[in-house]
């Protein structure tokens, strides 16, 4: 396992192209899901320094907080509630340029301004979500969605 990441500066596509293979190397020989999700959060936080990065996992028909980096967060989210619950329900990526404009947004922190949420799929079911928040408006776009979807494919191999 790598003890240190090589962080890339510049365009976000270049940053993703640098960090994703490093994440793959970190998780490929580890079988523990929580350890892998924790290291993924840490790697993304180091590379991009987003406000909040974390996983919510489906347990007993609700999303329950998993490994994350950032300030304390909401612990449980109902299906269809907020951005995470909506991504879970719809099983699709949701990009929110301004969280104040998302009907039903759950405010875990007033510092969060924009968000992207990606479902984690296993055998056709959503088993969790990756939630990333920024303290800047319009932080996320299709470039993020494309590369983070590649990360989801890595994650789905050990879920």
Image (cartoon, rainbow, N blue to C red):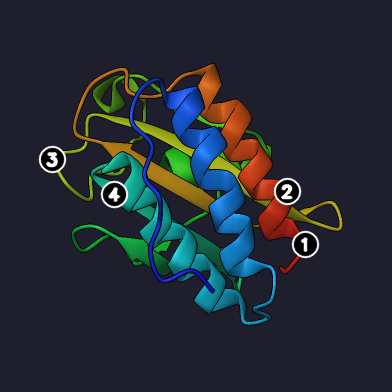
Q: In this view, does 129 lie above or below 147?
A: below
| Residue 25 located left or right of residue 80 | right
Q: Earlier in the sequence, mark 1 or mark 3?
A: 3
| Few, some or many residues within 10 Å of mark 3 (<14, 14–19, 20+) | few
Q: Which of 28 and 85 is in front in this view?
A: 28
Measuring from the top left, give residue 89's x and y in whole percent. 63, 43
Callout 2 secondary element = helix
Q: Nearer the viewer, mark 1 or mark 3?
A: 1
Q: Which of marks 3 and 2 is in front?
A: 2
Circle number at residue 157: 1
Q: Earlier in the sequence, mark 4 or mark 3?
A: 4
- The residue at the point 38 percent across, 64 percent down is 4
Q: In the shown orientation, is residue 93 left or right of residue 156?
A: left
Tell which of 19 and 126 is nearer to you.
19
Report the residue that reaches farthest toward the right. Answer: 123
Residue contact at pointers 4 and 2, CB within 8 angstroms: no
Q: Which residue corresponds to the image point at 44% horizontal and 69% vertical from the top-left?
A: 38
Q: Where the N terminus falls, by quadrant?
A: bottom right
The span from disc 4 to disc 3 (Cα, nearest Å) is 12 Å
Q: How far apart are marks 1 and 3 (CA)?
A: 34 Å
* Image position, residue 32 (x, y; %): 62, 82
């Amino acid at each position: 396992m790598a003890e240190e990441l090589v962080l890339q500066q510049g365009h976000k596509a270049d940053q993703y192209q640098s960090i994703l293979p490093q994440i793959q190397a970190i998780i490929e020989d580890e079988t523990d899901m929580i350890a892998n999700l924790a290291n993924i959060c840490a790697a993304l936080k180091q590379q991009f320094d987003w406000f909040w990065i974390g996983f919510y996992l489906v347990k007993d028909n609700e999303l329950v907080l998993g490994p994350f980096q950032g300030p304390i967060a909401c612990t449980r989210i109902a299906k269809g509630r907020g951005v995470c619950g909506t991504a879970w329900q719809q099983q699709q990526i949701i990009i929110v340029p301004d969280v104040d404009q998302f009907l039903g947004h759950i405010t875990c922190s007033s510092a969060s301004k924009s968000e992207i949420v990606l479902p984690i799929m296993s055998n056709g079911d959503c088993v969790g979500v990756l939630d990333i928040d920024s303290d800047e408006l319009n932080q996320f776009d299709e470039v993020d969605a494309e590369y983070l979807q590649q990360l989801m494919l890595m994650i789905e191999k050990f879920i």
